[in-house]
Image (cartoon, helix red, strand yellow):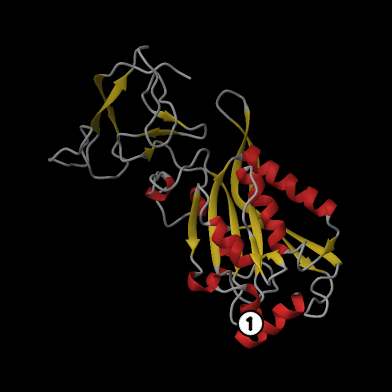
Amino acid sequence: MQPARAISEHKRTMPCHGLGLAYSGPFFSKNATCQPFIIHSAQISSTRYMVCSFTGKERDEETGYGYFGARYMDHELMTMWLSVDPMADKYPQISPYNYCMWNPVKMVDPDGKDVVLVIWASYNGKVGHAGIAISNYREEIDANGQTQMVPDGTYTYRDLWPGNGVGKDNFSENVPAIYDDYDIVTLEQLLTEDVTGEEGRPCDGLILFSTDFNLDAKIQQSLNNFEELNPSYNGLKVNCSDYVEAALETMVGKQLPVDEKLSSKTSATTPNQVYKTAVTLKNGKILKDPGDKVNNGFIRAVAGGPIKEKIAESILD
């Protein structure tokens, strides 16, 4: 941890980045013009320790900027980065200088990388599905000649399917598992297309989680381990939602309450329950909200009504 600094203000000039503002910190000048502007930065002497209040990152001792590993932030300038987001091509609708999609109260962005939960809700007779998308990276050499891993703007999408048809007569039996792995998928495709090729519609819900290269590598390995341990699909014990659960639990480092009670004696991990649990996790941003679709219980959603739901529950018991 770097020592904090006793604050004494000095001035430096910076370009306006097209904001059309003259800044004299900590508040905007009343005479806002699009000129190189002046801001006050903190000079820090070793008197105490200090971190940024909402990001938890220490300020660089020489510049007064917050250092996040991937780039620097000027906290006085509207929580704005001083260089373009390396993931900017994935979010063309948002300024490449933004921090956390302009929502620093709800989100944090430690490195600018992410993992995406994708779900097709269970409702109106639809079984539903769940998958996980993890950032892809490329090697780059920085100014100091050091190799670093940088997101390339695409994802690897992974999910689990039964190799044979599964229905009411064999949902609890083991059948061969098929693990899909699509390694060049964009965020736009995840939002607007059926990346599975099986559901017949775009996803109903999508949540983006901030991660980093090392955590993403752990998540990928956890899914590899899951596949090695589970060569068979089982509708109650080893399904698509269990697969996604393994990724999310690796991400947060703890077990998650993703099991849904299907009957008095039977529980299973379901797409709707995975989504409802995921929205409670930190560092998550909902990019596509499924609305009330995820509020359906799995048995009623699939059975198509309360009478058939009771019949299905009796079968499970």
Q: Quadrant of the C terminus?
A: bottom right
Q: Is residue 87 left or right of residue 228?
A: left
Look at the numbered disc 1 and give the secondary structure of its residue.
loop
The local crowd at label 1, few if under 14, some if 14 to 19, many if 20 or more residues have their Cα within 10 Å, is: some
Tell me the residue at 81%/77% (across/down): 165
Q: Position of residue 44 (x, y in %)?
A: 34, 17
Q: Nearer the viewer, residue 300 or 154?
A: 300
Q: Is residue 283 left or right of residue 6?
A: right
Q: Amino acid at mark 1?
A: Gly
Q: Position of residue 115 (x, y in %)?
A: 59, 50
Q: Is residue 194 above or below residue 225?
A: below
Tell me the residue at 30%/22% (across/down): 42
Q: Position of residue 130 (x, y in %)?
A: 65, 64
Is residue 307 at least partly visible in the picture? yes
Check disc 1 and report the residue beneath it.
125
Q: Position of residue 10 (x, y in %)?
A: 25, 20
Tell me the residue at 45%/55% (across/down): 92
Tell me the residue at 53%/54% (across/down): 208
Image quadrant of residue 216?
Answer: top right
Work out which residue is located at the far top of the displayed protein and give it: 46
Q: Nearer the viewer, residue 288 or 300?
A: 300
Work out which residue is located at the far bottom of the displayed protein and give it: 307
Work out which residue is located at the far left of the displayed protein and give it: 30
Q: Is residue 277 left or right of residue 217?
A: left
Is residue 188 at least partly visible in the picture? no
Image quadrant of residue 33?
Answer: top left
Q: Count every numbered label the image shows and give the total.
A: 1
Image quadrant of residue 201?
Answer: bottom right
Q: Is residue 73 above or below residue 89?
A: above
